[in-house]
Image (cartoon, grey):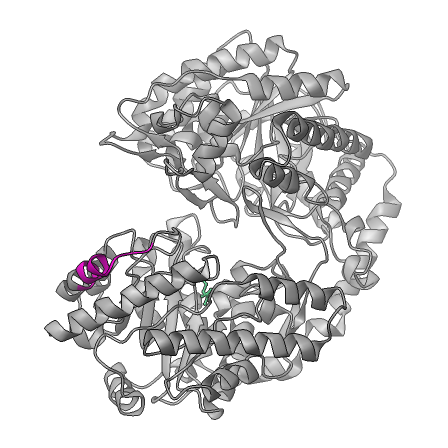
């Protein structure tokens, strides 16, 4: 194949949109935390960071990329970096004199100042800090970080392409505060700063700049679409500037594609994993542009089908000015390298590509486009993919046969009213029953025991003995406090998803597959590759042990199918909905076993229900339908007298409120402490008439809520919900809190419930 006539000068052929930054062994995470703890100073932190960047630049160049993103490095978050770039930190941080400490204060808060809010980056598991824009916000350009990184890369001889988040995405992701009007109205204040930035980057030697505008793959208002043309006409109209590459990812550009293409920008990137290439041919203006084709999946861990990718690239050749190969998005979302996984079974490893391997895939594809010999690499990929497809572990005939017999009817329980009556008889709870969400503080002893087990210093039996003793303590504490529905505290769980994934066939865990979730927090998502089979009961021994210590009901605690998938790398060879039904079946079997063991209440957590919501409105109903169906499948195997609870948190529930009602859980505990019970009105508006426990205090803060405060919340809740339906609980699990705080807070919670009960 040949790229045909190149009409774009200084074009490049192989790149990625961004790279991981926490360090192959989480060196940056450790250095930042050491800085926070006062163990190292800023100079030492800076030198760790510089060494990581230098090594990474060298690796990217050795791999054969001819344009390398710079400026995607971050001490915490790229959106916070952009807020700093644009001088848009709220004034409450002004008192922190040191710039780095001010930056970290904005990220994490300090004793006196609340941090910026954090929320999810599009439909990924990465969390960004939400910029706040007030009427009084004045923007100003602070380009030091990106200029320094550009200079550093150029000094190393790196073909550097600085990356910044674009003005439209920045404003669409920000939050208007203090009565600020629509934020897009502030574009005219930002564009001159970008103009200045482009000039500085150009003078510093940048040939290209990448301006990230992922917000353009969401449903845009007419005003936003118009802004696309306006902003990029203006920026591309400058003479003293690098070539402009506008990067989009996580979906299709839709109407933003022709809008962008008709501006004077030199290039744009399109996500060909989440979207298709057909639209490109319909936009004639692309014939004069560099199109950077994201054919290598930047956010999942599977090896690319190189033949299919070449076919996709081939369809673009005639329609674009120049073609470059890239990842579909930044590699921030995948682990560094399979080299860090020496113990992974070679066959499984051959199916995978982490960041380093994806970079190689990009360069192989770019070489193929240049008609260079890559037959060996193509063949190797073909063999690995064929091996994956043929692997018997991908398919469980038993699971598929069972699912085929379970139609939608098997997912439905009896009418809520009759369930309520049967459960009331069996449980005999007081009005306003008190409970908690599941986890209790992960004490030092728990962490020590887990580490000792991992290192082989203690055996399984000793570990189990220690966990049982934790459970006994948690049950005793709850008895002492007078809670009504108890939990075992989840000490045995490293993580609410990984714990289950480890017990399913069809999943494997990486040893070092860390990805940044936010700041220095990294997660190691388990990898789902085959049909999900529950090997044996997973939680029954722990829960029945806890139940044996008390006559009060102990809740069985499970994670729901949507959340398990949301926090995993999922298979790409079948629809997510199919994987969800398989996980649901495994959870359903567990609920049946818990019930048979005498457990009367089972909670199936779905905190990630909102997270997987598609970015485009048109795709939302189908997702919500399968998500709700999977939850129902997982919870409808038990009898009517078994009470099903669920728990939701971490999000605005507006768009999923109907789905929450659709889950049909007997009791839903839901984060509400910060949204002041508005969620109850929203639930009423969709006809929700089941049990509900709006969180009455915020567990994300160490503050102990007073009895009066909780009483006030409960009285407010009773305005919206009849007493028969109201539960009393914190707004989330307690595992990140200290024991003393938890005890004090729950004592007040129980006292508040008693006080309000007495008023009834
Ligand atoms: N049951 C889990 C816990 O209490 C729920 C966690 C969550 O809401 N994310 O930790
Ligand atoms: Zn929660």
User: Residue 223 at x, y = what percent?
Assistant: 31, 30
Confirm whether residue 166 shows in the render: no
Q: Is residue 638 left or right of residue 163?
A: left
Residue at image coords 63%, 55%: 524
User: What span is colored magenta in the figure?
Assistant: 704-714
Quarter the C terminus occupies:
bottom left
Instruction: Give the image quarter of residue 663.
Output: bottom left
Residue nearest the viewer, comparing 454 with 232: 454
User: Residue 141 at x, y = what percent?
Assistant: 46, 16
* Magenta region, main secondary structure: helix
Residue 670 higher or lower than 399, as above or below: above
Residue nearest the viewer, comparing 682 with 462: 462
User: Is residue 171 in the magenta section?
Assistant: no
Residue 492 higher or lower than 640, as above or below: above
* Total numbered circles: 0
Residue at image coords 61%, 39%: 330
Residue 163 higher or lower than 39, as above or below: above
Quarter the N terminus occupies:
top right
Residue 76 higher or lower than 459, as above or below: above
User: Residue 752 at x, y = what percent?
Assistant: 22, 66
Confirm whether residue 441 shows in the render: yes
User: Is residue 708 in the magenta section?
Assistant: yes
Instruction: Give the image quarter of residue 723.
Output: bottom left
Residue nearest the viewer, comparing 487 with 558: 487
């Amino acid at each position: 194949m040949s790229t045909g006539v190149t009409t774009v000068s200084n074009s490049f052929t192989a790149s990625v949109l961004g790279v991981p930054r926490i360090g192959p062994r989480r060196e940056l995470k450790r250095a930042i935390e050491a800085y926070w703890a006062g163990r190292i100073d800023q100079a030492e932190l800076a030198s760790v960071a510089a060494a990581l960047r230098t090594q990474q630049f060298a690796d990217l160049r050795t791999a054969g990329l001819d344009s390398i993103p710079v400026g995607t490095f971050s001490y915490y978050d790229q959106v916070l970096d952009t807020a700093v770039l644009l001088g848009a930190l709220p004034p409450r941080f002004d008192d922190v004199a040191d710039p780095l400490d001010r930056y970290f204060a904005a990220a994490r808060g300090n004793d006196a100042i609340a941090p910026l809010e954090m929320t999810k980056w599009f439909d990924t598991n990465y969390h960004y800090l939400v910029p706040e824009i007030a009427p009084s916000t004045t923007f100003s350009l602070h380009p030091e970080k990106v200029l320094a990184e550009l200079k550093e890369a150029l000094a190393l001889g790196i073909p550097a392409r600085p990356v910044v988040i674009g003005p439209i995405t920045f404003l669409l992701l920000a939050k208007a505060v203090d009565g600020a009007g629509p934020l897009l109205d502030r574009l005219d204040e930002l564009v001159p700063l970008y103009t200045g930035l482009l000039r500085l980057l150009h003078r510093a030697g940048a040939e290209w700049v990448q301006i990230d505008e992922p917000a353009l793959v969401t449903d845009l208002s007419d005003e936003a679409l118009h802004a696309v043309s306006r902003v990029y006409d203006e920026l591309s109209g400058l003479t003293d500037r690098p070539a402009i590459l506008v990067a989009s990812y996580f979906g299709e550009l839709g109407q933003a594609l022709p809008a962008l293409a008709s501006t004077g920008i030199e290039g744009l990137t399109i996500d060909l994993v989440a979207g298709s290439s057909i639209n490109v041919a319909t936009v004639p203006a692309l014939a004069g542009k560099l199109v950077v084709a994201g054919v290598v999946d930047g956010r999942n861990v599977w090896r690319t089908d190189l033949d299919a990718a070449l076919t996709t690239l081939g369809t673009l050749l005639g329609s674009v000015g120049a073609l470059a190969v890239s990842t579909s998005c930044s590699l921030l979302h995948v682990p560094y390298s399979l080299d860090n996984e020496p113990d992974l079974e070679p066959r499984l490893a051959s199916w995978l590509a982490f960041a380093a391997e994806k970079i190689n895939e990009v360069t192989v594809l770019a070489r193929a486009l240049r008609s260079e010999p890559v037959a060996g690499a193509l063949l190797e990929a073909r063999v690995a993919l064929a091996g994956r497809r043929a692997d018997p572990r991908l398919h469980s005939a038993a699971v598929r046969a069972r699912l085929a017999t379970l139609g939608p009817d098997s997912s439905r329980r009896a009418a809520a009213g009759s369930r309520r009556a049967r459960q009331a008889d069996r449980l005999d709870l007081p009005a306003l029953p008190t409970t908690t969400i599941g986890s209790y503080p992960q004490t030092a002893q728990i962490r020590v025991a887990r580490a000792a087990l991992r290192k082989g210093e203690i055996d399984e039996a000793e570990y189990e003995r220690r966990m049982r003793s934790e459970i006994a303590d948690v049950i005793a504490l709850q008895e002492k406090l007078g809670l009504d529905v108890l939990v075992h505290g989840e000490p045995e769980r490293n993580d609410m998803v990984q714990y289950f994934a480890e017990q399913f066939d069809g999943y494997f865990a990486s040893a070092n597959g860390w990805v940044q979730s936010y700041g220095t927090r990294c997660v190691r998502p388990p990898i789902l590759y085959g049909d999900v089979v529950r090997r044996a009961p997973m939680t029954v021994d722990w829960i029945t042990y806890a139940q044996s210590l008390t006559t009060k009901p102990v809740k069985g605690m499970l994670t729901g199918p949507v959340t398990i998938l949301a926090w995993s790398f999922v298979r790409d060879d079948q629809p997510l909905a199919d994987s969800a039904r398989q996980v649901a079946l495994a959870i359903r079997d567990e609920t049946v076993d818990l019930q048979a063991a005498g457990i009367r209440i089972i909670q199936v957590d779905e905190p990630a229900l909102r997270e997987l919501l598609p970015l485009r409105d048109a795709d939302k109903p189908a997702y919500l339908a399968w998500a709700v169906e999977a939850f129902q499948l997982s919870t409808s195997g038990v009898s009517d007298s078994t009470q099903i609870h669920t728990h939701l948190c971490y999000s605005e529930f507006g768009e999923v409120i109907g789905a929450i009602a659709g889950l049909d859980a007997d009791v839903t505990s839901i984060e509400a402490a910060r949204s002041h019970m508005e969620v109850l009105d929203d639930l009423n508006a969709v006809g929700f008439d089941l049990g509900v426990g709006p969180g009455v205090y915020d567990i994300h803060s160490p503050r102990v809520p007073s009895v009066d405060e909780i009483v006030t919340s409960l009285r407010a809740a009773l305005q919206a919900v009849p007493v028969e339906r109201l539960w009393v609980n914190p707004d989330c699990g307690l595992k990140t809190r200290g024991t003393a705080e938890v005890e004090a807070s729950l004592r007040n919670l129980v006292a508040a419930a008693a006080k309000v009960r007495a008023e009834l």
